[in-house]
């Protein structure tokens, strides 16, 4: 069905930034409960535009978690700002909200909060810190479509939220992303920058900025929009599978993820921690032998070559939880067509290891 939707749109001949993209945008803004939504070519483009819309640039400091997919930090570098890293909570894998205030300086402009693996960060506390210090908040909700905290959708807490629809996320457009906000001014900037700097709605085109081409195609929008009809089902199914992991995995050196109070996890990833890196690598190889494909979770960004050379942090002492999540973390299979018996088998293989 998803594929025939994409093909139907291909046959119309209207391929870019047309009716389907508009439908996709209205759908997401309703789901997330923001006034505006703008589809973009991918989640990284979304973060880049979010920073530009907030006027962030050279010399500004942006607070980000030390553990995330590298794109969170790359987007900060793209606008010439500096990354200021904060360690994560060891069980939630999200930024430790208690450690944000101590790194705020006169140059700090914003916090990028990541809802890692589909679990919302502690937004009520983070918004308080941001308000107290006059900071903007961008939510990197790349993994968090369908995730809520006290029934409020990820992406709707801060100034701007950014989603990704890469195939590793719960639903996909191939490449794709969506920016949400309730501020008209930010939305206008996003829509201008994603479309060659053209003032939205102007005719003839008024070129008011040196923009990018970060647009999404209509067949991609149709492909992902059709999957939204199953999103609740997908998340429910993954939640059931996660509960099987919780019941079945019983290994003294494997730490299961924690779920924060009030959070509805979207289970983009089921991420466990091994005792050390050697065990993680051996467990990964063992599971592969047993026919189970696993993957790494995300990066300890300040320990990656570019960031290590530029910022010179000692991750072991400064970001121990992020480093542990990076070097000892393992993402187990979780997807809506996986069966409970298969999850039981994977758990048993882990217990046997
Ligand atoms: C996937 C992901 C991104 C990047 O999204 P793309 O669509 O691949 O550009 C950014 N941040 C996080 C936390 C992600 O998981």
Image (tube, rainbow, N blue to C red):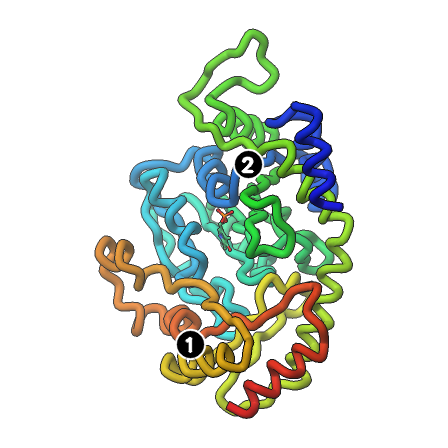
Residue at coordinates 73% horizontally, 48% vertically from top-left? 228
Please give left or right for residue 258 compared with residue 244 in the image. Answer: left
Point out which mark residue 177 bears.
none
Determine which quarter of the picture holds residue 178: top right
Q: Give the tally of numbered discs.
A: 2
Residue at coordinates 76% horizontally, 53% vertically from top-left? 230
Would you name the residue on which mark 2 appears? 40
Would you name the residue on which mark 1 appears? 328
Front one among 255 and 62: 255
- Percent position of residue 82, x then y: 32, 47
- Percent position of residue 85, x then y: 37, 58
Mark 2 crowdedness (10 Å alpha carbons): few <14, some 14-19, many ≥20: many
Ligand 1 within 8 A of label 1's CB? no
Please give left or right for residue 233 compared with residue 256 in the image. Answer: right
- Percent position of residue 299, x then y: 40, 63
Q: Is residue 26 above or below residue 104?
A: above
Residue at coordinates 62% horizontally, 68% vertically from top-left? 334
Q: Secondary structure at mark 2?
A: strand
Please give left or right for residue 203 compared with residue 280 in the image. Answer: right
Name, please, the residue furthest toward the top. 204
Q: Secondary structure at mark 1?
A: helix
> What whole-number distance in Å separates the C-alpha atoms at marks 1 and 2?
33 Å
Front one among 171 and 43: 171
- Percent position of residue 317, x then y: 30, 73
Front one among 184 and 258: 258
Determine which quarter of the picture holds residue 187: top right
Q: Earlier in the sequence, mark 1 or mark 2?
A: 2
Front one among 101 and 53: 53
Q: Is residue 207 above or below residue 75?
A: above
């Amino acid at each position: 069905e998803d594929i025939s939707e994409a093909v139907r749109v291909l046959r119309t001949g209207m391929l870019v930034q047309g009716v389907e993209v508009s439908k996709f945008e209205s759908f997401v803004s309703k789901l997330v409960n923001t006034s505006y939504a703008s589809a973009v070519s991918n989640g990284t483009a979304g973060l880049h535009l979010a920073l530009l819309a907030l006027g962030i640039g050279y010399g500004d400091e942006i607070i980000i978690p030390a553990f995330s997919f590298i794109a969170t930090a790359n987007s900060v570098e793209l606008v010439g700002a500096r990354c200021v890293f904060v360690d994560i909570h060891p069980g939630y894998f999200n930024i430790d909200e208690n450690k944000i205030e101590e790194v705020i300086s006169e140059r700090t402009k914003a916090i990028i909060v990541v809802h890692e693996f589909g679990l919302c960060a502690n937004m009520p506390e983070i918004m308080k810190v941001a308000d107290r210090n006059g900071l903007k908040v961008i939510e990197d909700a790349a993994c968090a479509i369908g995730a809520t905290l006290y029934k409020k959708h990820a992406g709707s807490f801060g100034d701007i939220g950014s989603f990704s629809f890469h195939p590793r996320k719960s639903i996909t457009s191939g490449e794709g992303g969506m920016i949400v906000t309730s501020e008209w001014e930010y939305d206008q900037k996003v829509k201008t920058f994603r479309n060659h700097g053209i003032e939205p709605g102007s005719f003839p085109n008024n070129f008011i900025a040196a923009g990018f081409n970060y647009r999404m195609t209509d067949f991609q929008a149709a492909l992902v929009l059709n999957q939204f009809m199953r999103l609740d089902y997908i998340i429910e199914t993954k939640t059931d599978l996660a509960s099987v992991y919780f019941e079945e995995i019983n290994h003294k050196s494997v730490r299961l993820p924690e779920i924060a109070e009030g959070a509805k996890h979207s289970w983009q990833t089921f991420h466990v921690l091994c005792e050390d890196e050697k065990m993680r690598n051996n467990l990964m190889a063992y599971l592969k032998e047993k026919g189970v494909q696993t993957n790494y979770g995300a990066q300890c960004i300040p320990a990656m070559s570019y960031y290590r050379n530029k910022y010179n942090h000692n991750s072991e002492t400064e970001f121990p939880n992020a480093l542990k999540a990076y070097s000892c973390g393992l993402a187990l299979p979780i997807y809506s067509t996986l069966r409970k018996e298969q999850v039981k088998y994977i758990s048993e293989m882990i217990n046997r290891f």
